Image (cartoon, grey):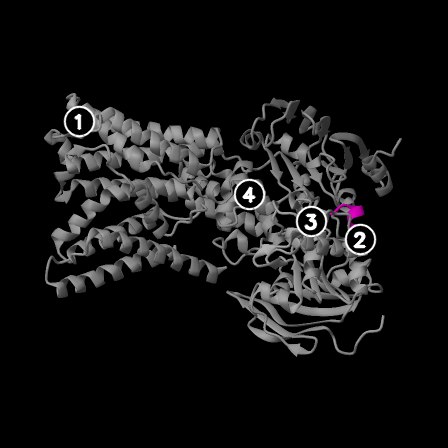
């Protein structure tokens, strides 16, 4: 494709300081018309801040932004949109009770004398959707659409605003494989029509399928840029963290004999089971499966977060009655939930309170907190897990994703669990922090904790488990020893194609 | 913490302004021992309500029924006194009645999953209605001296209502900031699902919050009846809003998870000081309502501004 000499968008020496942190240090970014520009970096590297500045959600301290050669001052997100810069957030921002057409033209409905011209609006919406090859009715309600189609509607909204630059923040994380393919086709057609796409991601392989250029940020600085198709994974990972891929999975110790967790016929009417399995002390049981295969339901039923209709659980050989997460905690069975912001952390409370939350019984006497013991213990865990936080008083909200995940993990380590269930422990976490989480999982196993590791990242399940269980339609369809668990075999079981 | 300090500064500033204004006005003086104790005695009913409301609000709920629960508790205590029950028993009746209405709120919110706004709005009507039914529309008055001591007595030279208020806030502060219970309340208000998955018994905790709020309303009802020497069917009408306003001015967030007992005390004092000052300056009670409403708005606006700067 012929590129113009002058880039479409130039960000020069962008600097942003937050209290105590230099979030962006003279970062440059330049994007051409019709280019798909990947933005890579660990959490806390500054990607989100840079994009927030571009989309008007956050002012910059110094620097210059030029669009089509002209310097621009971005005052607010709506101002950014009128300038032609649209951001598509991970958490989609549609109004659930309005139709697709309403959402696309929200606030700019074609109208005459104050009355909305519904027909025209729906026709315009239909035209946009067709341009995206989207099989979505303009009069469907947003809340009835699957996530992938909601995302599409957001992209249409951006296009209806004549977006010149569209920023996508981890767009594939809620999508299935097929939906991802659709999104990529869409990105290619955006590209063909001259729109520039800035694409934030953690998934290298995937992104390489559509990206032209990669820019890597680390600790608020721009490390460098490279052509997306030819640069090696190793080099990218090195740019991001200064480590190579071969080191990612730690060595596992042999599990001990016996069973620390034994589950028989665990079921929840209509969504789960019956499921039976066992985990030995020091064993990591990986759980693979497609989205909707019942993995999270299994985790939640195990710890009593959702009502179940059958099943017996034994821990360390003794039957336990688990009717609530409280019972589970008392039995030493703990869950790191998949969505750490919505289910794991209390974002408005300090790290100290978040970590001690599950051990308040032990850390208090006659109901009164032993504040010094609490602080000592939390400090110990924060050091041990290397949570990067200036003080224990820092609000959980202000930590990066990886550090937030460590805070939730620290909370459970404080109760000395016998079985830990990890649901998507590395979702939205950068490579460096991932490696640390893996090491922690392996270390816990070495100490004799039984581990159930649920993940959509097949490489992670295969690299970090002694055995791999595969789920489909709410049941465990196979349990494979690590040696015979190849990605192909696991996928065949997950999709119901396997006969062994 | 900083936000409570902000409220405390606002309180001092108001006090200084009123000192100067009343001196220039030449009438009753704001800065006089008699007046200051007067303010504290007047504020104690709202303050006790606010202490209870702090728990409910920090825990992510809201209780609109406390004004009516105050009235029903006062009426029942008064009835017991009129039946010549011993004073401590009569007080216990009021406290337990408050706690019982609170427990009913707790069941509706925690076990039957009603939104707290609706559940306590219903309870507000029920409690007020019960008061009218019980009193037959007419007040009960003239209580024994042993009861009026709660308003008129002194302990070591300190007026009894102040002693009660000090005890309530002392215990409330320790309970919210130093105990396992208090810590769980912040977690509940900040993120209920995370609290539940961490093994906190969320329903029981929520229920307890409303019981505390109701018991505080019961106590406030007893204090009010002792001060007025009368239990009236319309007692405490609208007090729930004063209590909520005090808590919010003291730095709590209506979305839960933030706020302190000390802050709520400062909030209640601000309301009391403003009311008293306006009285001394001979501002009509109609304009006082306008002034107090505006102060609440300004306080919350300042807070919203501060939050935005911080985030």
Identity of the residue drawn at 30% across and 59% down: B10
Tell me which corner region of the image, top left, top right, bottom left or bottom right, holds residue A276. top right
Mark 3 vs 2: CB contact within 8 A: no
Crowd band around label 4 with a 10 angstrom C-alpha radius: few (<14), some (14–19), many (20+): many
Q: Position of residue A196 (x, y in %)?
A: 74, 66
3 or 2: tag closer to the N-terminus: 2
Query: Which residue is more in the foreground, B27 or A239?
Result: B27
Q: Chain of mark 4?
A: A
What type of secondary structure mainly makes up the magenta span?
helix
* Residue under label 1: B87
What span is colored magenta in the figure?
Answer: A174-184
Q: CA distance from mark 3 to mark 2?
A: 14 Å
**Tag shown at residue A411:** 4
Secondary structure of the residue carrying numbered label 1: helix
Q: CA distance from mark 1 to mark 2?
A: 80 Å
* Residue under label 2: A133
Question: Horizontal placement of A489 versus B37: left or right?
Answer: right
Q: CA distance from mark 3 to mark 4?
A: 35 Å
Query: Which residue is more in the foreground, A13 or A220?
Result: A13
Question: Horizontal placement of A199 versus B196: left or right?
Answer: right
Question: Horizontal placement of A57 versus A479: left or right?
Answer: left
Say if A223 sits above or below A494 in the image. below
Q: CA distance from mark 4 to mark 1?
A: 49 Å
* Residue under label 3: A150
The answer as to whether the residues below labels 3 and 2 share one chain is yes
Say if A334 sits above or below A23 in the image. above
Q: Position of residue A389 (x, y in %)?
A: 54, 56
């Amino acid at each position: 494709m012929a590129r113009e000499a002058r880039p479409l968008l130039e960000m020069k020496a962008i600097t942003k300081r937050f209290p105590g942190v230099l979030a962006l240090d003279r970062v440059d970014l330049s994007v051409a018309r019709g280019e798909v520009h990947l933005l890579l970096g660990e959490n806390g590297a500054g990607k989100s801040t840079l994009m927030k500045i571009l989309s008007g959600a956050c002012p910059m301290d110094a620097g210059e932004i030029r669009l089509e050669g002209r310097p621009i001052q971005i005052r607010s997100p709506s101002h950014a949109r009128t300038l032609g810069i649209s951001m598509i957030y991970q958490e989609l921002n549609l109004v659930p009770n309005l139709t697709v057409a309403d959402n696309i033209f929200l606030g700019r409905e074609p109208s005459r004398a104050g009355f909305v011209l519904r027909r025209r609006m729906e026709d315009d919406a239909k035209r946009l959707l067709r341009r995206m090859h989207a099989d979505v009715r303009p009069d469907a309600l947003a809340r009835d659409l699957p996530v992938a189609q909601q995302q599409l509607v957001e992209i249409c909204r951006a296009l209806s605003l004549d977006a010149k630059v569209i920023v996508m923040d981890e767009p594939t994380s809620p999508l299935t494989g097929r939906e991802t393919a659709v999104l990529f086709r869409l990105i290619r057609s955006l590209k063909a029509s001259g729109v520039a796409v800035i694409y934030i991601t953690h998934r290298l392989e995937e992104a390489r399928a559509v990206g032209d250029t990669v820019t890597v940020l680390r600790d608020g600085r721009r490390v460098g840029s490279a052509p997306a198709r030819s640069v090696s994974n190793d080099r990218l990972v090195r740019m991001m963290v200064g480590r190579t891929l071969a080191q990612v999975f730690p060595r596992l110790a042999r599990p001990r004999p016996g069973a620390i967790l034994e589950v028989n016929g665990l079921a929840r009417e209509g969504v789960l089971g019956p499921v039976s399995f066992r985990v030995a002390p020091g064993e990591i049981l990986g759980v693979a499966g497609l989205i909707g295969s019942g993995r999270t339901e299994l985790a939640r039923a195990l710890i009593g977060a959702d009502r179940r209709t059958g099943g017996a659980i034994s821990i360390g050989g003794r039957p336990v009655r688990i009717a609530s997460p409280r019972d589970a905690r008392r039995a030493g069975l703990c869950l790191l939930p998949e969505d750490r912001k919505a289910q794991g952390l209390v974002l408005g409370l300090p790290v100290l309170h978040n970590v001690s939350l599950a051990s308040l019984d032990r850390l208090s006497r006659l109901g009164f907190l032993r504040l010094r013991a609490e602080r000592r213990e939390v400090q110990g865990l924060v050091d041990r897990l290397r949570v990067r936080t200036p003080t224990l008083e820092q609000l959980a909200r202000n930590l990066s994703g990886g550090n937030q995940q460590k805070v939730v993990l620290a909370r459970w380590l404080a109760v000395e669990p016998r079985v830990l269930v990890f649901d998507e422990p590395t979702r939205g976490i950068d490579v460096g922090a991932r490696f640390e989480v893996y090491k922690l999982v392996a270390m816990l196993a070495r100490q004799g904790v039984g581990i159930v590791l649920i993940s959509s990242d097949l490489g992670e399940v295969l690299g970090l488990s002694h055995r791999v269980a595969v789920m489909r339609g709410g049941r465990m369809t196979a349990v494979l020893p690590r040696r015979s668990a190849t990605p192909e075999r696991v996928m065949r079981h997950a999709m119901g194609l396997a006969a062994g | 913490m900083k936000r409570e300090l902000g409220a405390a500064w606002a309180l001092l500033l108001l006090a200084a302004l009123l000192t100067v204004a009343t001196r220039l006005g030449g009438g009753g003086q704001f800065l006089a021992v008699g007046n200051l104790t007067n303010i504290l005695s007047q504020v104690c009913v709202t303050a006790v309500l606010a202490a209870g409301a702090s728990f409910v609000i920090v825990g992510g709920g809201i209780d609109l029924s406390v004004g009516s629960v105050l009235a029903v508790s006062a009426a029942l205590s008064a009835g017991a006194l009129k039946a010549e029950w011993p004073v401590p028993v009569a007080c216990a009746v009021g406290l337990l009645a408050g706690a019982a209405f609170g427990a009913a709120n707790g069941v509706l919110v925690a076990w039957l999953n009603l939104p707290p706004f609706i559940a306590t709005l219903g309870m507000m009507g029920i409690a007020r209605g019960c008061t009218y039914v019980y009193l037959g529309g007419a007040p009960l008055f003239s209580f024994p001296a042993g009861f009026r001591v709660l308003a008129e007595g002194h302990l070591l030279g300190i007026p009894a209502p102040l002693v009660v208020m000090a005890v309530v806030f002392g215990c409330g502060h320790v309970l919210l900031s130093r105990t396992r219970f208090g810590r769980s309340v912040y977690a509940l208000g900040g993120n209920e699902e995370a609290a539940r998955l961490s093994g906190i018994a969320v329903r029981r905790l929520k229920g307890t919050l409303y019981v505390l709020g109701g018991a505080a309303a019961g106590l406030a009802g007893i204090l009010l009846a002792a001060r007025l020497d009368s239990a009236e069917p319309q007692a405490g009408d609208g007090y729930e809003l004063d209590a909520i306003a005090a808590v919010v001015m003291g730095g709590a967030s209506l979305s839960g998870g933030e706020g302190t007992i000390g802050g709520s005390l400062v909030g209640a004092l601000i309301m009391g000081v403003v009311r008293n000052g306006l009285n001394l300056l001979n501002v009509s009670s109609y304009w006082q309502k306008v002034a107090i409403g505006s102060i609440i708005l300004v306080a919350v606006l300042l807070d919203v501004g501060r939050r935005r700067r911080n985030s």
